[in-house]
Image: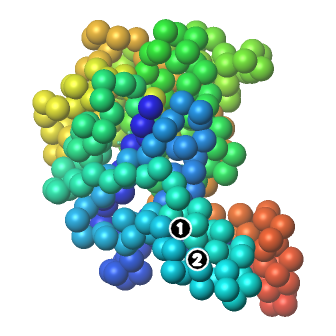
Amino acid sequence: MKAIIPAAGLGTRFLPSTKCTPKEMLPVLDKPVIQYVVEEALEPAEVDGAIIVTSPGKPELLSYFQPDRSLETLLRERGKAAYADAVADAGGMPVDFRYQYEPKGLGHAIRSAADACADESFLVLLGDYVVPARDICTKMLEVSRAHGGASVIAVAPCSPEDVSRYGVISGDRVGSICGAETAGDEEPGAVWRVSGLVEKPAPEEAPSNLYIVGRYLLSPLVMQLLKDQKPGKGGEIQLTDAMARSLDCEVMYAVVIDPLSGYDTGTPSGWMATNALMAAADPRFSDAFWDAIEERGGLKRA
Ligand code: G1P
């Protein structure tokens, strides 16, 4: 099974930093954001490769996932084995690339990788969300196995005024993943059968407040439907619309996750908070991080 990671956007919100550096290459602690997403994608045993869909203007992404033997050798000669290992890790992952030549939306980006998925189900991981525990795809695969290989998406509750930022589902709670049997309908572990999907609805039109968080396990039918998917919301080819069409022929499930299991890296302030929260929690960085903050009297909201 392949995992598709769309990474073709312009990174407008991060300009001017993204003028020469792709948004996906901005660091969280000591690694670029994209590496967290690739590592999460490769976590389930079923996944044998990640496909990054990028635009021709971002050669840095391709270079990053190439081996760099001379840098590794140099670092080893200088006794910097840990850095050499980190360089080897980045260049040794099963990552392949496809191009999205025009910015026509998420559905269009995903269908640019159709040839890589053969006729199999595939994962989609959106890159603005870092999941350190890397456990969401495993949960979706568990639900899919329990339902004959059906499509499964991860959802989480949001406030009614936020629904217009996301894809939103309608459906019914039908069960739980193992170990979450008593969870409430919108609590982590609840499993829903999806009856409809709508991209970025107005609050008064939203069928629920369960939004798609950006982790999908989709059947080959969804890829097939994407091929003739017409533009939808914002004039873009929407993945949500092809998923909604698939409901005419197939069942789809949603598993509720804790929205705090991931960290937002899609906006400058989200990215900054993610770096701070992860630094504060990482034993490699936390002492120096807190020392630097406390030296200036701690952090207080102005
Ligand atoms: C995309 C999807 C949307 C989903 C969201 C999650 O929207 O189209 O359904 O809820 O990602 O972040 P975008 O954020 O690309 O506008």
Neighbour tally class for label 2: few under 14, some 14-19, many 20 plus, Cα within 10 Å: some
For residue 23, above or below residue 247: below
Tally the marks: 2
For residue 125, above or below residue 17: above
x and y percent of residue 283 in the render? 84, 67
User: Three-letter amino acid code at disc 1?
Assistant: Pro
Neighbour tally class for label 1: few under 14, some 14-19, many 20 plus, Cα within 10 Å: some
For residue 248, above or below residue 102: above
- The yes-or-no answer for disc 2 within 8 Å of ligand 1 is no
SS at circle 2: helix
Q: Is residue 202 visible?
A: no
Task: Choose between 207 and 41: the one closer to the eye.
Answer: 41
User: Three-letter amino acid code at disc 2?
Assistant: Glu
The C terminus, quarter of image: bottom right
Name the residue located 23 percent from the left edge and 44 percent from the top edge.
112
x and y percent of residue 38 in the render? 51, 52
Task: Choose between 167 and 120: the one closer to the eye.
Answer: 120
Q: Is residue 132 left or right of residue 58?
A: right
SS at circle 1: strand
Name the residue located 67 percent from the left edge and 19 percent from the top edge.
177
Asked where in the image residue 16 lies, by quadrant, the reply is bottom left
Circle 2 is placed at which residue position?
72
Task: Choose between 212 and 114: the one closer to the eye.
Answer: 114
Circle 1 is placed at which residue position?
32
Q: Is residue 130 visible?
A: yes
Distance CA(mark 2)–CA(mark 1): 18 Å
The N terminus, quarter of image: top left
